[in-house]
Image (cartoon, rainbow, N blue to C red):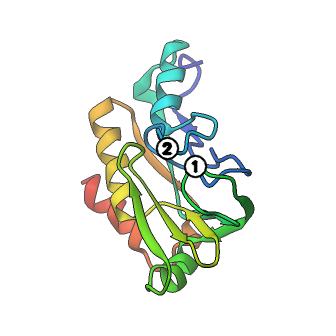
Amino acid sequence: LDNYLDYVNMMSYDLNNTELACHHTSLHTSTTAKAYGFSIEYGVNRFASLGFNKKQIVVGIAFYGKYYKNATALGKTATFSKNIHYTEISKTYLKGGNYQQLWDEVAKAPYILNTVTGEYISYDNVRSVTEKCKYSKSSGIMGVMFWDYSEDTTGTLLKAIGDEMK
């Protein structure tokens, strides 16, 4: 297809399993929260193995998260509840309280866990966005895109893309 297309926007989010507290937009496949085993790197490598030119692949960054209930830990059974905008995540869940901001070093993905209420959120933050931008430059793909502009009214994630992709 790369002979007929200028580029492909790879929707590399919504990769979550609705029955596990897992990542929905990880850069690499997590060893803890494997879910389906998908990640941005997996998708890029899969397209390339099928003959698609990596230089025509644009990977996605999510300006929203996945909110779960009944979660106890990353990779454990949980109940998917809803999508949640980064704006709400930053204003409500990144302010402390019983919400732990955690990082999966293998997946290069953040997540929030509240073991008191059983809440779990998989999302992108400045660190994960920066990692994805660095990956796009080092792996030879075309670049990054995001969904959806209106879901981060803080401008935080867009600024992280702009800063890293200079």
Look at 35% across and 68% down and name the residue there: 159
Q: Are marks 1 and 2 in contact (CB under 8 Å)?
A: yes
Give the percent coordinates (x, y) of residue 81: 75, 66
Say which mark, if any, is on residue 63.
none
Task: Choose between 62 and 74: the one closer to the eye.
Answer: 74
In the image, 137: left or right of 87? left
Q: In the rendered image, which residue does mark 1 sit on?
A: 75
Give the percent coordinates (x, y) of residue 75: 58, 49
The residue under label 1 is which amino acid type? Gly
Relative to 56, say whether 60 is above or below. below
Look at 27% across and 55% down and name the residue there: 164
Q: In which quarter of the image is the N terminus?
A: top right
SS assignment at label 1: loop
Q: Quadrant of residue 138?
A: top left
In the image, 74: left or right of 104? right
Label total for image = 2
In the image, 133: left or right of 83? left
